């Protein structure tokens, strides 16, 4: 999960591959030169974060943030694997996403984080925008009831 300062986002959120020559100043202040096979979370002008790896400094929350946008995503492990190491990074996010995260937990996590923010900071919750690419979700094999009874 990643928190963005909503007021620092130009337009909406776009999930795309990095553009040739694109750079991103990371939350730790270092600059990453992005490869075209690096997944980024972007607005209509620039990359905001390396998807599933590291957030960007210019869209991060700070003491003056008034409006927060929470991103709670499932990233296919194949789209994350090796990307953090290529940039000399090892983050909690990359560690988890490279190994796979249960995509069924995203909505519950978003609800919990939103509830905590509201309880601690106050404010109002905005809408949940759910964008799902079914092609990247793990396959769930069908299981007949007869087989389920046999397993039990």
Image: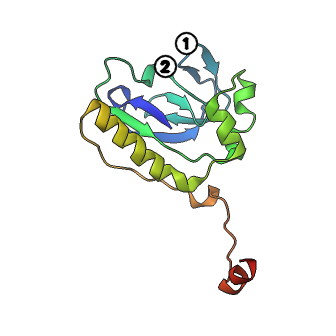
Side (left or right) of 141 relative to 111 = right
Q: How many marks?
A: 2
Seen at 47% across and 41% down, the residue is 14
Q: Secondary structure at mark 1?
A: loop
Which residue is under mark 2?
Answer: 57
Q: Within 10 angstroms of label 2, few (less than 14), some, or many (20 or more) residues?
A: some
151 and 142: which is toward the camera: 151
| Disc 1 crowd, CA 10 A, few/some/many (<14, 14-19, 20+) | few
Which residue lies under the disc numbered 1? 29
Q: Which residue: 29% across, 44% down? A: 126
Q: Are circles 1 and 2 on residues that touch, CB within 8 Å?
A: yes
Q: Percent from the top left, x then y, of residue 71? A: 46, 40
- Quadrant (top left/top right/bottom left/bottom right) for the C terminus: bottom right
Q: Is residue 37 visible?
A: no
Q: Distance between the Cα atoms at labels 1 and 2?
A: 7 Å
Q: Position of residue 115 (x, y in %)?
A: 34, 42
> Which of pointers 1 and 2 lies earlier in the amino acid sequence?
1
Position of residue 37 measured from the top left corner of the image (x, y, whole percent):
68, 36
**At numbered mark 2, what does the secondary structure look like: helix, strand or loop?**
helix
Where is residue 8 drawn, in percent x and y?
36, 25
- Can you tell which quarter of the image residue 121 is in? top left
Pick whichever, 147 or 49, lies toward us: 147
Residue at point 69%, 26% (across, down) = 90
């Amino acid at each position: 999960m990643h928190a963005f300062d909503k007021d620092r986002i130009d337009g909406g959120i776009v999930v795309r591959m990095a553009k040739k020559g694109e750079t991103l100043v990371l939350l730790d202040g270092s600059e990453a030169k992005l490869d075209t096979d690096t997944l980024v979370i972007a607005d209509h002008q620039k990359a905001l974060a390396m998807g599933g790896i590291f957030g960007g400094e210019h869209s991060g929350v700070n003491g003056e943030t008034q409006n927060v946008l929470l991103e709670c995503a499932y990233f296919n492990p194949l789209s994350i694997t090796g990307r953090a190491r290529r940039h000399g990074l090892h983050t909690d996010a990359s560690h988890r996403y490279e190994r796979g995260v249960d995509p069924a937990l995203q909505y519950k996590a978003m609800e919990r984080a939103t509830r905590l923010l509201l309880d601690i900071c106050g404010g109002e919750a905005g809408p949940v925008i759910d964008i799902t690419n079914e092609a990247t979700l793990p396959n769930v094999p069908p299981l007949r009831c007869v087989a389920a009874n046999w397993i039990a």
